[in-house]
Amino acid sequence: MSGPSSETARHTPLYDLHRELGGRLVPFAGYAMPVQYPSGIIAEHTHCRTAAGLFDVSHMGQGTLTAAKGDPAALLERLVPGDIVGLAPGRMRYTLLLNSNGGIEDDLMATRLAADRLYLVVNAATKDADFALIARVLGAEAKLERHDDKALLALQGPAAATVMGRLSPDATKLPFLGGGFCKLGGQDVFITRSGYTGEDGFEVSVKNAAAEALARLMLAQPEVKPIGLGARDSLRLEAGLCLYGHDIDTATTPIEAGLAWTIGKRRREAADFPAAAKILGELKTGAKRKRVGLKVDGRAPAREGAKITDASGKEIGKITSGGFGPSFGGPIALGYVAAESAAPGTSLFVSVRDKPVATVVAPLPFVPTRYYRGT
């Protein structure tokens, strides 16, 4: 396998802690990251579904966008289809960086800190390209300040709110897709409430120098255990969430990916985002292919790149993510198929170990999500 080894890859501020905890480190997006800890992926997955798991996501890109004049949200909308201008202070939105062909350069989270400031979180593998694209398109009208001096920790699971209520009561007042400045472990941090697992959860942005102490504080709570990349992937797969570079990429449109909901009503009416004519055309008439969930027969999972065929043996698509769903209780996958074969309940076949295995199109998510909706 080409690329940096886990020894030569970049380190997050929690690298030494991962090693101390027995994490098996692998190269991921240029960083040495823990794929699992001694308890194993299934145990970590189950713990996050039943209690609370702590993830190191410090490899992701954080930044603050301001405008030389006016609202930076209006500037960001030149690149994304989401309604960013409509965000109230303290509210966050999932959106997509689009190219001129309607493909997805990345998916990201944008939070309005104030009328003149946006906080952005982008994917690790694309952060340099993302920030360069934003700076190039917006030019002197905007200033993008990278926060390479900050770590990012994610606490996920049904007990996450209990833990945060104990350590930072103000954080539990946040609504789903909300963010605010709080105190945690004596540190000034910025906390958002969302997650990549389908569970309630919080993301904590903290200075690099304070990250390890904060992680140790959270891990000292009886509900919390460290979780690696392996369980992070199985958790998000069960939740039906896209992984950039696999389920979405520069050749995939939001409509094909089942992400039409990211296009705000005002943006649809204005048709003022990249490749709007193409994307809105697909929204109206339908895309030729669609992302679907697949329930695979047997116990062996279908892996990325596996061919999907119809009953006649004709290839109609490919798997983009696949694995075993511990909470689901069997192998599951995401993939793209021809639109006429995308309806839930459609019987298909997928190649597993070079043999056709029966599969059926399943509704997403595979496991019900439990995001916080308030009381």
Image (cartoon, rainbow, N blue to C red):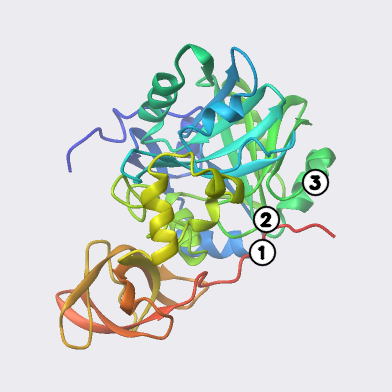
Q: Are marks 3 and 1 in contact (CB under 8 Å)?
A: no
How crowded pointer 1 is (Cα within 10 Å; few <14, some 14-19, many 20+) is rated as: some
Q: Residue at x 46, y 34 (%)?
A: 79
Q: Which residue is mark 1?
A: 370
- Image vertical order of residue 358 relative to residue 178, above or below: below
Q: Are marks 3 and 2 in contact (CB under 8 Å)?
A: no
Label number found at residue 172? 3
- CA gap between label 3 and label 1 equals 15 Å
Badge 2 element: loop
Measured as percent of width and height from the top left, residue 67 is found at 59, 17
Badge 3 element: helix
Write down the quadrant of residue 362 in the picture. Answer: bottom left
Q: Are marks 1 and 2 in contact (CB under 8 Å)?
A: yes
Residue 57 vs residue 83, the one in the foreground: 83
For the question of whether residue 323 can be seen, the reply is no
Q: Residue at x 42, y 44 (%)?
A: 34
